Amino acid sequence: MTRPISDTIRYIGVDDNTLDLFESQYEVPEGMSYNSYLILDEKIAVLDTSDGRTADAWMQNLEEALAGRTPDYLIVHHMEPDHSACAAALMAKYPSLTLVATAAALKMLPQFFPGADLTGRTRAVTEGDTLPLGTHTLRFLLAPMVHWPEVMVSFDETEKVLFSADAFGKFGALEQTGGLWCTPETDWSCEARRYYFNICGKYGPQVQRLLAKVAPLGVQTVCPLHGPMLRDTLAEALRLYGIWSSYGVETPGVFVAYASIHGGTAAAAERFAEILREKGCPKVATTDLTRDDLAEAIEDAFRYGTLVVAAPSYDAGLFPPMHDFLWHLQIKGWQKRRAAVIENGSWAPSAGRVMSEMLSAMKDVQLVGERVTIRSRLREADIPALEALADAVLAG
């Protein structure tokens, strides 16, 4: 099914309601949308394709929207297969079609479509290049490392629409999460935040550069490659992207992340969270890293200003679920935060040392308070140390 964005721009994307793991790692209980668009003008432009899982449905949508016409251009904003998997098949179906992308993307084409001969059928564009379609003109803006090096976005100068590639995307199929358009009643930020920090979190400076390019354009609509279109809620999305990409604190509060083997560390972490609440902390969020979604834990670590980690020692090091969490934070560029450490050890505590070393290796991360060591189970004698740590955490 196709749907109008405007009189001349149509949505031809596809929902995938059977996908369980996006990029084989992120849980998507509400599925995923693969967005694609069609501009119907004197010249017709197809903007991105779809994932191979939904190729047949996407091709059907395209043919329905074309209504017998022949497209002139295929715009590839991003070469990742969930957006470009149908490109070679589309080029084969329409021999007069020209593929438009960055030079970096064109270099990747043979990697994804070995054996496809597109000689003389591609056009490389760079910063500021335009593509007249008739009443519409697309202007291309390079967006390297948002989140691959070949990415670009395009701006329709006529209708002030930004086709934003993966920027402003979110998890979830459109029909399961509110439909084509994001409304003020739609809970956009939760899954958009989880998407942003797990997909683009490492590339805040690059996102900031793209936002600076987009700011003077007077964008009225954003059409991302995943998730709903943004118009009435665009100002809020831009505000959040400004915070996220600058590694600012979105929500004042403390995030307590713990991993526990036999329940002792979990009890200590939950008691510490209670102490924070009793002392007036505006928001305390907790997660069990052994059972909860790791991507949501990454999201919350970026959302709040202070992270408290609690984990047991393991093989003279650190319990693996906590090690994995901290490693993910490091590769996603977690920074500009305060952190505190609670460890558990029955005979030779080592978790606190490892957690402190991993946190200290991250950019602009300040360790606060004295490390608290629990011996197997939380005791009343440990409470004063937790109280003191809570005071240090809240002092910032």
Image: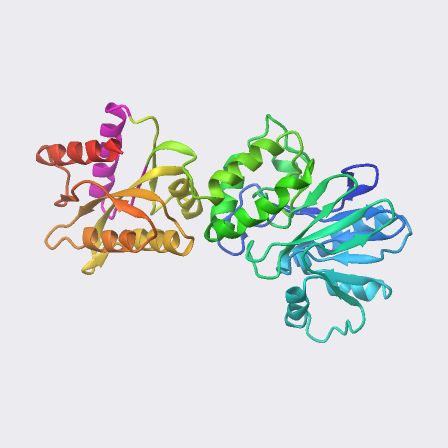
Q: Quadrant of residue 375?
A: top left
Residue 170 lies left or right of residue 288; in this view the side is right
Question: Residue 343 appears at what percent x and percent y?
Answer: 19, 47
219 to the left or right of 280: right
**Residue 95 image point, x, y percent:** 86, 66
Q: Quadrant of the C terminus?
A: top left
Q: Is residue 260 magenta?
A: yes
Q: Position of residue 44 (x, y in %)?
A: 84, 52
Left or right: residue 149 versus residue 262 is: right
Magenta stretch in the rendered image: 255-280
At 62% from the left and 57% from the top, the residue drawn is 151
> On the rendered image, what quadrant is the N terminus found in?
top right
The image quadrant that residue 385 belongs to is top left
How is the structure coloured here? Answer: rainbow
The total of numbered circles placed on residues is 0
The answer to whether residue 59 shows anywhere in this view is: no
The residue positioned 14% from the left and 53% from the top of the image is 349
- Name above or below for residue 188 compared with residue 147: above
Examine the rendering and report whether any part of residue 255 can be seen.
yes
The image shows residue 125, relative to residue 299, as above or below, that is below
In this view, which residue lies farthest toward the bottom?
Answer: 115
Expressed as whole percent of the image width and height from the top left, the position of residue 239 reads: 53, 35
Comparing 168 with 152, the one in front is 152
In the displayed structure, would residue 383 be above or below residue 376?
A: above
> Is residue 264 highlighted in magenta?
yes
Q: Residue at the spot x=53%, y=43% of the render?
A: 29
Give the camera-side residue of 121 and 82: 121
Of all residues shown, which one is farthest toward the left?
381
